[in-house]
Image (cartoon, coloured by chain):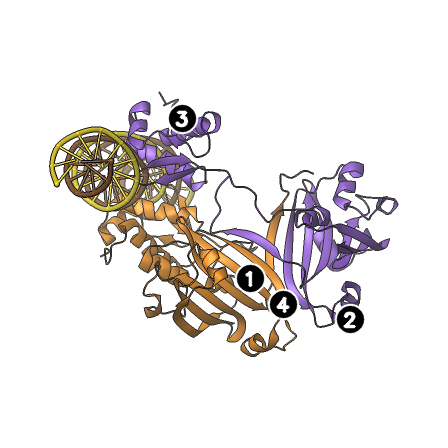
Chain colours: A purple, B orange, C brown, D yellow
Amino acid sequence: MLNDSLLPKHVQLRAALLKTIEDELQPGAMIPSERDLTTRYDVSRATVRAAISSLVNEGRLTTVPGRGTVVTRPRVESNLHLASFTQDMRQRGHRPSTEVLSAAVVEAGEATAKALGISPGDSVWEIERLRLADDEPMAHEVSWYPEAIVPALGDEDLSGSIYAILEATYGVVITDAHQTTWAEQAGHTYAHLLEVGETAPVMVFDRVGSSHEGPVEQTISRYRGDRYQLSMSLQRGPSAR
Amino acid sequence: MLNDSLLPKHVQLRAALLKTIEDELQPGAMIPSERDLTTRYDVSRATVRAAISSLVNEGRLTTVPGRGTVVTRPRVESNLHLASFTQDMRQRGHRPSTEVLSAAVVEAGEATAKALGISPGDSVWEIERLRLADDEPMAHEVSWYPEAIVPALGDEDLSGSIYAILEATYGVVITDAHQTTWAEQAGHTYAHLLEVGETAPVMVFDRVGSSHEGPVEQTISRYRGDRYQLSMSLQRGPSAR
DNA sequence: GGTACGATCCGGTACGTACCAGTGAGGATG
DNA sequence: CATCCTCACTGGTACGTACCGGATCGTACC
């Protein structure tokens, strides 16, 4: 039944189970019992349990003592994902808009150069924008993009998603990002822009966005603390994909 | 050796191993061999392997065929993961300590009841703690745990990891959590506790921790904005809109 | 007809044995 | 002295047995 050799039986059995739960079974359906599987595939129960526990560990199956083992309902959505401000605000039920404050080619500072993998002094587009939700200030953003990657960025309409421009005009797809966040007082400059008090709390995000070929974007965003919150899921360890 | 209670042996052994790799061993060090552990704790090798594989699955241990099992080196870049305050601060190079402000059984409020899947008014342990890093206040935490799950939580030493207590005493392993974070001004109460100004920014985390069987913990933490920051990775969601 | 009980199934726990392939230290060999 | 090889030891695989407590359901009893 199994034993194409080469691979351990519990790995082969795992693959066989995964195939059936993907092709034949609905979420919530029960898979055959462990003892049933031992006779079907002619393996020991320990082997069956190894295969099953592997799938349980990845969230594909759930065991119910006294009942059986059921196919897990797929998760609806992971909260923390890479989304543009526009997408993000729409999902939260707000109407997003953007005010472009400035767009110019400048020399990259040290931190930006390091983040983008270029040399300090290299030319980068610096885009400064105010992000509104329902016509009230939500966030202030400054972004930097290497001019070498997006030479004519300033010619585009920057009031929408820059990610969309990167894709449509330059074929650059930001697939993942890394960001650090902390809390600050607004201070004079941002208090004015965000229309809050100078001591009002803001959430700062320093984000570096990357395509498959490397870093493309650095953005520092300041969100009004009274209007923004962030949800995320945490796992204890890597759940091997 | 084990069996001080009614918990499964592999859970007890898991807790024992976790304690030793946290207290005694350095990252990269090898734990005793599986066969060694069977004689030390007088259990079968299957039990030892169950305990070890659980820790491997969470990224605490790594097995090396032919060599042994080593304590995992923590990742340099502390990404977003579920870690206790103690672990978190150590990874950041600080010396953590804790001051227990109060511990009492109270009636669950509405939000807590909803988060924990119990009824408002049900008994919950309320633990209030001040978390210090290098002897300076870093965060204030209030946690709630259903009394039905952890009846004698107040008898334990609450100055360390409550997650460790949950595992060792009650066999409850928090495997994942969901949290929402936002920025606030400290305000009178927390300014005093955290030793900052009343308008100083704090990062608030509202977290619900769950075991395989459901929610176990709600914690609201307030971190000093000037001392704490959070890093995370983002991937592009499947919502290609 | 409703309840209580027991048979039977389920996953969970725990024990034992056996053999394999890779590692690495130390002794035998050249 | 360097090299090779043996061998003890490691985790990985796989088998078997046994018993537990929870869930389910049919049946016998009130």
- Same chain, labels 2 and 3: yes
Q: Which residue is mark 1?
A: B205
Q: Residue at x 37, y 59 (%)?
A: B166
Instruction: Determine if residue B167 is in view.
Output: yes
* Residue type pointed to by label 2: His
* Residue type pointed to by label 4: Glu
Question: What's the distance in space between the residues labelled 2 and 3, CA to CA?
Answer: 67 Å
* Residue type pointed to by label 1: Phe
Q: Nearer the viewer, mark 4 or mark 3?
A: 4
The quarter of the image holding the C terminus of chain B is top right
Question: Quick one: label 4 or label 1, which is nearer the N terminus?
Answer: 4
Q: Residue at x 27, y 51 (%)?
A: B9
Label 1 Cα crowd, 10 Å radius (few <14 / some 14-19 / many 20+): many
Occupied quadrant, residue A212: top right
Q: Which residue is mark 2?
A: A188
The quarter of the image holding the N terminus of chain B is bottom left
